[in-house]
Image (tube, helix red, strand yellow):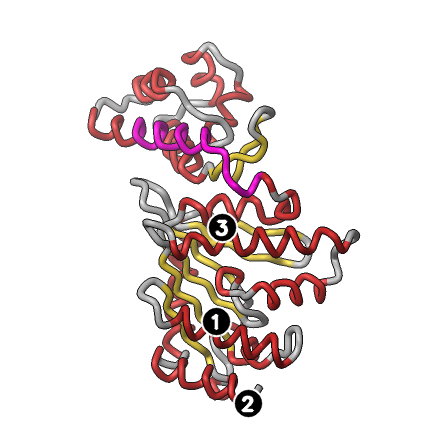
């Protein structure tokens, strides 16, 4: 999802390039050509064509036009759609994200790069409060509890980076966040009662804003579609940009980028939301748990 530039470090998402590469791959396979045919038309290597089709490199307009001509695409409107994807992707790659100053984010840099250009995020969490909604003390307690830091001094910059991500919720064009959280995450004493009381108060404040929607799946809901595990769906405004599904597993981060995968997880998210409490009732439950703290 992210590229590396020796002068700039980690760049922003290449989700648009993957979409563009996928379209070119589909066109090539439809007309029965091989990557070697495309490479010959571009006077390039087969390896470069493979990278283009995977979205691993920015694409030049002349190369896109040459491939469209080779594959028999003559509809100028369709070609312009591809050129727009390529231009938008090149502009995104030029940006130097704020996250580069936080090496502690290395494991999440691809996700943060996506989050920074997203228009909306839907997230389902079973075990903890979503990062965009965490207080500093809660985020610090999560980092300490994870026990994965070899150098404890790295925890504070990690917390600062998490707070920097939250600026998207208050920006000129704020990120729209729909968080569905299991009741167990609200009752888990992360950092102790004082930390959780402040965290729940912060969550209540954000849930009352225009751009943050919070629902809670109560423990009494029993078996539900969300038991498969936590995930997030990241959406974008750019034409042709597909939703991206993000999941953390113990050994790695999993990205699902096909329309089929995105549609499946949108359906799962909707089913989870349906078994969750209505927003007003969710606020009441959060307030009740906060008072119990």
* 252, above or below 57, in the image: below
The secondary structure type at the circle numbered 2 is helix
Task: Give the Cα separation between the discs numbered 2 and 1.
Answer: 16 Å
Observer-side mark, 2 or 3, equals: 2
The residue under label 1 is: 202
Q: Is residue 39 above or below residue 99?
A: above
Q: Are marks 2 and 1 in contact (CB under 8 Å)?
A: no
Q: What main secondary structure does the magenta stretch of the protein show?
A: helix
Instruction: Left or right? Give the position of 44 relative to 82.
Output: right
Q: Earlier in the sequence, mark 2 or mark 1?
A: 1
Q: Earlier in the sequence, mark 1 or mark 3?
A: 1
Question: Relative to 274, does residue 93 appear above or below in the rendering?
Answer: above
Q: Residues within 10 Å of mark 2 (few under 14, many from 20)?
A: few
Q: Nearer the viewer, mark 1 or mark 3?
A: 1
For residue 61, which quarter of the picture? Answer: top left
Residue 122: x %, y % from top left: 41, 61
Residue depicted at 44% across the width and 17% down the height: 37
Query: In the image, what residue occupies the spot 51% across and 81% down?
Result: 223
Give yes or no for residue 24 being in the magenta stretch: no
Residue at 63 percent of width and 58 percent of height: 249
Spatial CA span between label 2 and label 3:
39 Å
Q: Position of residue 83 (x, y in %)?
A: 31, 26
Check if residue 91 falls in the magenta segment: yes
User: In screen coordinates, is 137 left or right of 259?
Assistant: right
Numbered badge on residue 249: none
Q: Position of residue 130 (x, y in %)?
A: 52, 64
Q: CA distance from mark 1 to mark 3?
A: 31 Å
* Residue underneath mark 2: 292
The residue labelled by disc 3 is 256
Where does the magenta region start and end?
82-100
Quadrant assignment for the C terminus? bottom right
């Amino acid at each position: 999802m992210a590229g590396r530039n020796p002068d700039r470090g980690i760049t922003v998402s290449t989700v648009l390039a993957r979409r563009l590469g996928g379209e070119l791959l589909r066109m090539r396979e439809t007309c029965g050509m091989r990557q070697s045919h495309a490479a010959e038309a571009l006077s390039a290597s087969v390896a470069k064509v493979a990278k283009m089709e995977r979205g691993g490199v920015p694409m030049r307009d002349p190369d896109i036009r040459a491939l469209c001509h080779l594959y028999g695409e003559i509809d100028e409107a369709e070609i312009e759609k591809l050129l727009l994807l390529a231009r938008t992707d090149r502009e995104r790659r030029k940006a130097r994200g704020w996250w580069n100053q936080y090496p502690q984010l290395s494991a999440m840099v691809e996700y943060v790069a996506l989050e920074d250009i997203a228009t909306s995020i839907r997230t389902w969490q079973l075990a903890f409060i979503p990062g965009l909604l965490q207080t500093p003390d809660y985020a610090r307690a999560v980092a300490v509890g994870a026990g994965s830091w070899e150098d404890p001094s790295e925890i504070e910059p990690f917390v600062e980076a998490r707070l920097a991500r939250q600026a998207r919720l208050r920006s000129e064009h704020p990120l729209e966040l729909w968080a569905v959280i299991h009741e167990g995450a609200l009752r888990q004493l992360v950092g102790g009662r004082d930390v959780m009381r402040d965290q729940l108060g912060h969550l209540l404040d954000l849930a009352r804003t225009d751009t943050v929607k919070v629902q809670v799946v109560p423990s009494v809901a029993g078996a539900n579609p969300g038991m498969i595990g936590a995930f997030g769906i990241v959406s974008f405004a750019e034409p042709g940009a597909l939703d991206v599904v993000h999941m953390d597993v113990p050994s790695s981060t999993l990205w699902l980028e096909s329309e089929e995968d995105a549609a499946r997880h949108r359906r799962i998210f909707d089913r989870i939301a349906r078994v969750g409490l209505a927003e007003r009732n969710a606020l009441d439950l959060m307030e009740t748990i906060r008072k119990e703290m």
